[in-house]
Image: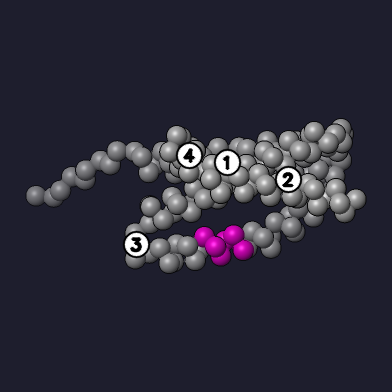
Amino acid sequence: HEREVGYFFGFVGLIIILIQGGLIGRLIKKFGEWPLAVAGPFFVAIGMFFYMRLAWHPWLITLGAAGAINASGRSFQQPTISSLLSKHTDPKDQGVTFGLYHGLNSIARVVGPIVAGVTYPLLNNTGHFLTAAILVLIAAAWTAALHKRATAPSVPRATSP
């Protein structure tokens, strides 16, 4: 089984290399950063639902689709979020912003497995995938709201006489 697990992770890694190593630039030029930052979590959620399906139908094609879709979504989201943070942060505040961003990522890597452990037994031992899907869909909605706010025309403030 170790060999099959290695093949799976190699496959997922190849998807990540292809997207982040060359395709992401073309996709950004075609669609823009905001749409990819919003679409990425949707892809991750779809991948999580495919992982859930494996509990009832353990088909290799489903596993491959889950891995490819999930890796694609993460590869769309991570580089574009970093770029958008850089572009929408005052240069003098970028150190604090990226420090907070990476700090929160680290906290998520600690809290995530705890939450996954608690939700794992649900839905035929797929609760952690459902939890992840819900969280990334919330992230997608939040990113879409930030995009709307960032691109909304600014209303000039009235000045006092």
Residue holding disc 1: 40
Give the magenta part as a residue range.
101-106
Say whether disc 2 or disc 3 marks the residue closer to the N-terminus.
2
Q: How is the image coloured?
A: one colour
Nearer the observer: mark 2 or 3; the answer is 2
Q: Is residue 81 magenta?
A: no
Closest to the observer, 15 or 159: 15
Residue plotted at (36% across, 40% down): 151
Q: Is residue 103 magenta?
A: yes
Under circle 3, the secondary element is helix
Under circle 4, the secondary element is helix
Q: Is residue 84 left or right of residue 78?
A: left
Label 2 – label 3 distance at C-alpha:
38 Å
Label 1 – label 2 distance at C-alpha:
19 Å
Across and down, in percent, residue 107 comes to 63, 63
Under circle 2, the secondary element is helix
Main secondary structure type of the part rendered in magenta: helix
Residue holding disc 2: 11
Kindly identify which numbered label has been placed on residue 91: 3
